[in-house]
Image: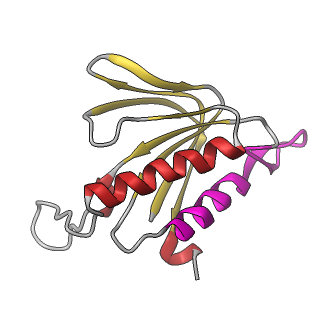
Amino acid sequence: MKFVIQRVLNGSVSVDGEIIGAINKGYVVLVGICDSDTKQIAEKMVQKMLNLRIFEDADGKTNLSLRDVDGEILLISQFTLYADCRKGNRPSFIKAGSPEHANTLYEYMITLCEKECPHVQHGSFGADMKVSLVNDGPFTIVLDSEEIVK
C-alpha cells in the first residue's frame, strides 16, 4: 500500500465538473493498493498517517499531528501509484490491486479515517477525477507499507 500525503491549506476533488469532496487545512492523500494488501496493513498505514507530526507548533517546529490541529482528510484512490516504468516508456500497472480488492480496502480506509477524524471526504473509486489543492509548504510525504509494516 502506498500513500502520498500532501499537507494542504485546502483541497477538492471533482467528477464531471462537480465537486464531490472538499477540505480545508489537512491532508490530501493519494492511495495506491496492491493485491497483497490487507485490512491490517490498512489499519497500520492509517494510524501512521494520522500520527505524523508534520504541522507546525507555536514555535514553528513540525511537532503537531493532524489530530492536534483538527485537520481534515481528502482520500483519493490512485492505482497509478503502482506504475512500473522499468521497461520502455509506457507504464505497466500489473502490480496495482484488482478493482474489487482495492475498492474494498479503500472503503475500509475511509471508515477508519471517519472514526478518527471529524471531517473526511473522498473521491469516487475508478472515476476520472480532477484533484485541486494548495500544498502547504510544500510538504509531501510518501508512506509505503513495505517500509512501514513489518
State whether residue 143 is above or below residue 19.
Answer: below
- Range of magenta residues: 39-67
Image mark count: 0
In this rendered view, identify the residue nearer to me: 125 or 74.
125
Q: How is the image coloured?
A: secondary structure
Corner quadrant of residue 47: bottom right
In this rendered view, identify the residue nearer to me: 117 or 82.
117
The structure residue drawn at horizontal position 41% and vertical position 19%, both measured from the top left corner, is 19
Outermost top residue: 18
Question: Magenta stretch containing residue 124, yes or no?
Answer: no
Q: Position of residue 42 (x, y in %)?
A: 53, 63
The structure residue drawn at horizontal position 63% and vertical position 41%, both measured from the top left corner, is 114
State whether residue 16 is above or below residue 105.
Answer: above
Q: Quadrant of the N terminus?
A: bottom left
Question: Magenta stretch containing residue 57, yes or no?
Answer: yes
Q: Quadrant of the C terminus?
A: bottom right
Q: Position of residue 109 (x, y in %)?
A: 53, 52
In this rendered view, identify the residue nearer to me: 126 or 53.
126
Outermost bottom residue: 150
The structure residue drawn at horizontal position 82% and vertical position 42%, both measured from the top left corner, is 68
Q: Position of residue 120 (x, y in %)?
A: 59, 35
- In-image side of 66 versus 133 (left or right): right
